[in-house]
C-alpha cells in the first residue's frame, strides 16, 4: 500500500523548503541555492562518496551528524567547494548563515555543494541570497530540486504515502546528478525527508542496506564524484510508534524508502549526461547477490554496450564480454541474454552462444527510450538490477567543454 | 644501444609473414588473414585476456603452447570466433590448415581471431585463402599487420636491433586493437618475434614482467576483450649464448622487449577508436608501484577526463577525482598536477588544491595531439605510466553501429 503523492521533500509533515538564484552561477534564471528546514530535530542518517578526494562540505556534514540528528540542509550548485584551501571554512560559513537566518544551530545543518572542482567558493553570494531563501520557505520542494541541478535537464523529486500502525506516513525526496556518477556508497546529492518516527540507529541501518541495491547500482559514466551525499531526515511527526528494532514497521519503511530510491535512480539514469535512453540491467540466477550486482553493474558501465544501445544495435557479445570481466563467479556456458522494451522482447543468446533473431525486431525493441537487458546466469537463485544510460555524442559534447 | 630498424616481425632472422584477403570480410580491399611462420621451432611465451569469456582460439592456443614451443601464428580479422558452439573446432581447423599448407604440425600453431563476437566463423574462406597466403610468405610483416586490423586506422609494426655478447639480435612486432581495450594480462592481439636465443622459461618470465608496465597500463575504453592474446616467438638464430637465467643479457633483452611494447602501446592508444589525442599519464612519488599503476590507470580510464582532453579543457579536478577513487594509498593533500605537450607545460594543482594558471596557455598545451598528464603524489619513490586517448564523438559513432 505505497501510494505516490505530490510534494517532494515537503510532503512529509514538518518540512519546508525553498530554492533561489543567489549568484554563484552567472545564468540568472538558474537557481543555485537550496534549503530544507525541519520543524523538529530529526533523526538523520547519511552515506557519502568513497572517493579519497572528498569535498569539504562532506567533512563538515560528517562532523555535524556525529550525534545523528539534524534540522536543516543547505546546498549550492555551480561550485563543488572541493580541492580548495579554504573549503572547510566556507562550508562551516554556510552552516552559520543557516543559524543566523533560521535560528537552527549550525551544528544541526547538513551542507553540500556541487559543480566545478578546484575553484574557490565565496560566501558573499550565499549570504546575499539567504534572506530571500528563508523568507520563501514553504511547500517549495520543486524550487529546492531546481536549485541543486547542475547539467541535469529535469528536476528530480518524488514522494510516497503509506501506513504504519494505522498512522499515515510520508516519505519525499529530491536529488540531482547526471555526470560523474558511479556512486559507491551514495549518489551525487540525494535528500530524503520522512515524518516516520524512527530511531537514528534504525534509520541509518535502513539507508545503509538500501544503497547497496539502489544508488550503488547506478552508473552514468563510471566516475565516482568527490561530493556524493545521500541524507535522510525523519521528523517523527506521523505519530507512529517509534521504530527501534527490525520489526514489521521497519520492513514497510524500508520498502517505502526503496520505492523512493529506485524511482530516483531511474530518473537519474534517464537524465544521464547526453543520454537518450534509460538502460536497466536485470540479472537473475546468480550464485550470490554480490555476483549478480557485479555482473549487472559491469554491463551497465560498459562504454561499448552503452554506445551500441545508442545505435540500437543488439550487439549482445558486448554484454557477455562485460559479464566476463565483471569478476562475478559464473559459468559462461549457461548465460542467456534478452533485450526488452515496450516494443517487445528479443532473445539473443542462450547457453553462452548466439541464437538466430530478427534484426528488424531487435532494432524496433532497441529504438525505445527504456531498454531492459535481461540476463539469466542459470547458476543460482540471486538477482540484482542496475541502472544506466546510453553513451552519446552529447555526453562527449557536455563534458568536452564543461567549465567554459 | 637499442636501434629502431625496419621489417616488423620479419626483421629477426628466421621469420616470414604474409597477409591476404580471403573473404571473411565483405570489403575486398581489406586483408583478413595473416600468417607468421618460423624456420625453426621457437621458444614461445604468451599471456591472454583475464575475461571469463574467452575466445575459442585462446583455448586452442593455450593447449598448443603447453610445451612452450611454436612455429607459426595464424590470425583472422572480421570474426572473433567467440561464443559459438563450434568455436574450438574452427580454431583447430585453422591450425590444421597451417599444417596442410606448410607442414608445420598443427600443435605448433598459435591461432587468434578478432572481430564480432557470437557469429559463426566458417573455415571455407580461410581454406580458400591459404594457397595465396602461404605462397606469398616473405618479408611481408606489413601485410600481416594489415590483415589483423579491425577498426584500426593505421597498421602497427615496429622492430629494434641490439647486441648480446657481440651478436646482433633483433626483435619485431605487429599488433592491433583500438576498441574493447583495457587489457588485464594482454592487449588485443600482439605478436613479437625475435632471433634471440632464450629459454622458454626466461622468455615467459620476461613477457609476464613486461605486461605489468606496458599493455596492462593501456586503456581505450575500459572494456577488456574476450580475445586478447600477446605471444612472443624466439627463433634463437642470432647465435647469442642462450639466456637461461636472469643475467645481464636477460636485462638487455627485457629492455628491448619493453621498447617494443611501449612503442606499440603508444601506437594503440593514439589510434584508439575515434581518438584525436594520445594521453600519457605519468605518476611519480607513489608509495608503491601498484599505487602508482592504480592512480595512472584510473586517470587514463576516466570518461570525464577523456572528454575534457577532447575539449582541450584543463579540468584538473577530474584528475584528482579519478586519483581519489583509484584505490591507491595516498595523501590527497600532497598531490601536484601538470599538463605538458610540445606547446609547453602548465601546472594546475599543488598540494591538492588549485593554483592560478593561464587558461590561454592551457588551451594551447592541450590542443596538441600528444598530452602528458604529470602527477606527483609526493608520498614515496615509485612511479608508473599509463596510455590512453580522448573520448570523442567518433568513438560513439564507431561503436554505435559496429555490426551493420
Image (cartoon, coloured by chain):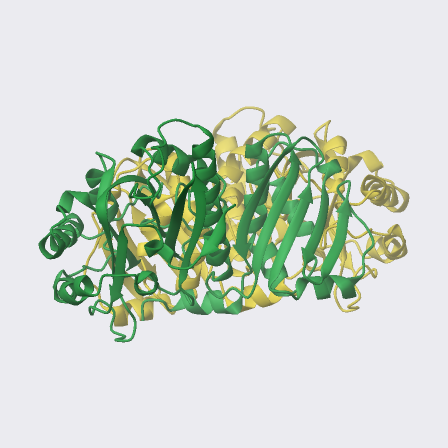
Chain colours: A yellow, B green
| Residue B343, position as x, y percentages in the image | 71, 63
Above or below, comparing residue A156 to residue B261 in the picture: below
| Residue A34, position as x, y percentages in the image | 75, 53
Image point (60%, 31%), residue name = A204
**Left or right position of B85 against A196:** left
**Left or right position of A290 against B140:** right
Residue B165 visible in the snapshot? yes
Frontmost residue, A126 versus B294: B294
| Residue B230, position as x, y percentages in the image | 35, 46
How many labels were placed on the picture?
0
| Residue A6, position as x, y percentages in the image | 60, 56
Residue A402 visible in the snapshot? no
Look at the image and tell me in which quarter the C terminus of chain B lies: bottom left
| View extreme (left): residue | B100
Frontmost residue, B169 versus B279: B169
Above or below, comparing residue B121 to residue B349 in the picture: below
Image point (86%, 43%), residue name = A93
Frontmost residue, B139 versus A271: B139
Residue A62's image quarter? top right
Frontmost residue, A241 versus A229: A229
| View extreme (bottom): residue | B28
| View extreme (top): residue | A245
Amino acid at each position: 500500500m505505497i501510494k505516490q503523492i505530490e510534494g517532494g521533500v515537503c510532503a512529509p509533515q514538518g518540512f519546508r523548503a525553498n530554492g533561489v538564484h543567489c549568484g554563484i552561477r552567472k545564468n540568472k534564471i538558474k537557481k543555485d541555492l537550496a534549503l530544507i528546514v525541519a520543524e523538529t530535530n530529526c533523526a538523520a542518517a547519511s552515506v557519502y562518496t568513497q572517493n579519497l578526494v572528498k569535498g569539504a562540505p562532506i567533512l563538515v556534514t560528517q562532523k555535524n551528524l556525529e550525534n545523528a540528528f539534524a534540522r536543516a540542509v543547505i546546498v549550492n550548485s555551480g561550485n563543488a567547494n572541493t580541492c580548495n584551501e579554504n573549503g572547510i571554512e566556507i562550508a562551516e560559513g554556510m552552516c552559520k548563515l543557516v543559524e543566523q537566518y533560521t535560528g537552527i544551530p549550525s551544528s544541526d545543518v547538513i551542507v553540500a555543494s556541487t559543480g566545478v572542482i578546484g575553484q574557490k567558493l565565496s560566501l558573499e553570494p550565499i549570504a546575499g541570497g539567504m534572506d530571500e531563501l528563508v523568507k520563501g520557505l514553504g511547500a517549495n520542494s520543486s524550487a529546492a530540486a531546481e536549485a541543486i541541478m547542475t547539467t541535469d535537464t529535469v528536476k528530480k523529486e518524488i514522494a510516497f504515502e503509506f501506513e504504519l500502525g494505522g498512522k499515515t506516513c510520508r516519505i519525499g525526496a529530491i536529488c540531482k546528478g547526471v555526470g560523474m556518477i558511479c556512486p559507491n556508497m551514495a549518489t551525487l546529492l540525494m535528500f530524503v525527508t520522512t515524518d516516520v518516527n524512527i530511531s537514528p540507529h534504525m534509520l541509518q541501518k535502513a539507508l545503509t542496506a538500501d544503497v547497496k541495491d539502489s544508488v550503488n547500482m547506478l552508473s552514468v559514466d563510471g566516475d565516482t564524484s568527490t561530493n556524493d551525499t545521500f541524507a535522510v531526515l525523519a521528523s517523527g511527526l506521523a505519530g507512529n510508534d517509534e521504530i527501534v528494532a527490525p520489526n514489521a514497521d521497519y520492513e514497510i519503511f524500508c520498502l517505502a524508502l526503496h520505492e523512493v530510491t529506485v524511482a530516483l535512480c531511474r530518473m537519474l539514469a534517464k537524465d544521464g549526461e547526453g543520454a537518450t535512453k534509460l538502460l536497466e540491467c536485470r540479472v537473475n540466477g546468480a550464485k550470490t547477490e554480490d555476483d549478480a550486482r557485479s555482473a549487472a553493474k559491469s554491463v551497465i558501465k560498459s562504454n561499448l554496450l552503452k554506445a551500441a544501445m545508442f545505435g540500437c544495435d543488439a550487439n549482445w557479445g558486448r554484454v557477455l564480454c562485460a559479464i566476463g570481466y565483471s569478476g562475478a563467479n559464473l559459468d559462461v556456458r549457461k548465460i542467456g541474454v534478452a533485450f526488452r522494451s515496450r516494443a517487445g522482447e528479443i532473445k539473443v543468446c542462450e547457453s553462452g552462444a548466439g541464437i538466430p533473431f530478427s534484426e528488424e525486431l531487435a532494432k524496433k525493441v532497441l529504438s525505445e527510450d527504456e531498454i531492459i537487458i535481461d540476463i539469466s546466469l542459470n547458476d543460482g537463485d540471486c538477482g540484482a538490477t542496475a541502472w544506466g544510460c546510453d553513451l552519446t555524442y552529447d555526453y562527449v559534447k557536455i563534458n568536452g567543454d564543461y567549465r567554459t
